[in-house]
Amino acid sequence: MSELHPIKVIINGNTYERQVEARLLLSDFLRHELGLSGTHVGCEHGVCGACTILFDGAAVRSCIMFAVQADGHELATVESLAKNQNELHPLQQAFHEAHGLQCGFCTPGFLMTLVPFLQENPSPTEAEIREAISGNLCRCTGYQHIVDAVKLAAEKMKSTVVSSQ
Amino acid sequence: MAPDSLEGALALKTEHGDDAKFLAGGQSLIPAMNFRLAQTALLIDVNNLKELDYIRRDANGDLHLGALTRQRRLERDPLVKQYAPLLHEAMPWVAHPQIRNRGTLGGSLAHADPAAELPVIALALGARLRAQTARDERWITVDDFFRGLFTTDLASDEMLVEVVLPPLPPRTGAAFIEFSRRRGDYAMLGLAAIVTLNESGACEKARLVYLNAGDGPVDAKQAADLLKGQKPSAEVFAAAASLAAEQEINPMGSIHASPDYQRHLARVLTGRALKQAFARASQ
C-alpha cells in the first residue's frame, strides 16, 4: 500500500511532521527522510544492534519497527549525545579514550544501548556489561576495549554527578 | 492500520481475515517481512491497545498476563518473580534487552516458533489462553494451542488477548536451561523442567518441555512418567534424560548443531534441569 500516513514524532528534542508510507522502516525514515545518518543499518533483522535508538527512553532496534509506529512517541538517536562539536558525551569520550571502536560502524548502536543501561545501573560489573552488549555485534574490536570503555564511562559519569553537586 | 480499541482491531480482523496480520512487538514479523519471507496485505498494529498490557494476580492465585505485556516487563515484574519463577528464570534468555523492550508475550505465543522460550514456558506451566473475536471469546488450554511449525489453534478472526498461569502446587520446583552459541541467540536446545514431590520426597508429577527439538514445544510425557514415584538420583535423571533425548524429541538440526548433537544436549541439559528442579522442590 503506497497510501501516505501523517506522523508527528519528537526526535532528539525536535518535532518532525512527515507523511510516510506504512511499509517504511523507522531506520530508513531516520536516515533517508530526516538525514539522521548516525543510526546505522547492519543486518536489518534485529541481530546486529547497529540501528539501536531510544524509543520513549528504551533501547530498541529501529530496523524492525515501522516509521508510522513512532507517531506520537519520543525518540533519541546517537546525534543527541554530544553537546556540540567539541564536547562528547562521557560515554563517547570513554569509547575514544579506551579504544572502544575501530571502524565505528557498530558504535552508534553500542552507545544507544549503553546510555539507558548506565542510567539504570551506574556501577555495572563486567559480567553485567557483557550481558548488556550481547545484542550488539562488533567485528573489529573483540569487545575487550568496549568493555573497558564502559567501565571508564561509568567512572566518568559517577564523578561528573559528584562534581556537579 | 493502528486501531485504538480491541473492538476496532477485532472488527478489522473479521473483515480482512487471513489477508491481515496483527502486529504486536514486531520482533519476529518485521524481520520476516524485511527478508520478504512474510508478505501481508494489511497489518493491524495493536500497540495502542494499552488495555492488553497488564499483570494481575486473582484470589485463586492465578496470574493473568495481558497479551501485549512487553517481555521486558515480564522479566522485571515482582509478581512474576514470586509466583511464576520459571517464567522469571527464562525471560533473560529471550533474545536481547532491545528485543524484549518491544517483544510481547502474546506475540511470541501466537508466532509459535519452536525455538522460542515463551511457548515452552506456557506449555510447561499449563497456561490457559483467552482468544477473542469481534463476537465472542473462548479459552484454549495450552495443550491444544500449538499446532506445529509457526501454527496455532487461533482462527483467522481471533486474537490471543490473555494468558493465565495457574499457581504452582506446594513442593514444586522448576528450572529452565538452554544452550546457545552466543548469549541471546536462538538456543540449539533447551528445556523447562517442573517437578512436584509428595510428602516423602518422591516425584508425584513432572513435566519436561523442550525448545528447538521438534515442530513446536515438545512435551516429553514418557520421560516425565518415568520420574513418577522416584526419588532424585543420578540414575533416575539419566534414565529420563535418555528416554526424552532418544525417543521423544525430534530435533531438525542446523548448520550449527546436528540432530545427534541436539540429542546429546538434551541428555546433558535434562540431567542438570532435573537436579535443579528436584532441589528447588524440596526447599
Image (spheres, grey):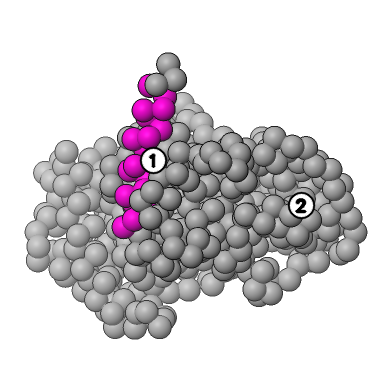
- Out of B49 and A114, give the one closest to the viewer: A114
- Measuring 74% from the left and 37% from the top, which residue is drawn there? A14
- The x and y percentages for residue B65 are 53, 40
- Measuring 29% from the left and 83% from the top, which residue is drawn there? B260
Q: Earlier in the sequence, mark 2 or mark 1?
A: 2
Q: Which chain is home to disc 2? A: A
Left or right? Give the position of A108 relative to A101.
right
Q: Residues within 10 Å of mark 2 (few under 14, many from 20)?
A: few
- The x and y percentages for residue B99 are 52, 53
The image quadrant where one finds the C terminus of chain B is top left
Q: Is residue B61 magenta?
A: no
- Measuring 20% from the left and 68% from the top, which residue is drawn there? B268
- The x and y percentages for residue A55 are 62, 43
Q: Is residue A157 magenta?
A: yes
User: Regarding mark 2 in the picture, which secondary structure is present there?
Assistant: loop
- The x and y percentages for residue B181 are 34, 69
Please name the amino acid that badge 1 sits on. Ala
Please name the amino acid that badge 2 sits on. Leu
Q: For mark 2, what is the residue?
A: A34
Identify the main secondary structure in magenta: helix
Q: Residues within 10 Å of mark 1 (few under 14, many from 20)?
A: many
Q: Is residue B199 above or below residue B214?
A: above
Q: Which chain is home to disc 1? A: A
Q: For mark 1, what is the residue?
A: A153
Residue B112 sits in quarter: bottom right
Left or right? Give the position of B35 relative to B237.
right
Spatial CA distance of label 2 from label 1 is 30 Å
Q: Which residues are magenta?
A: A144-162
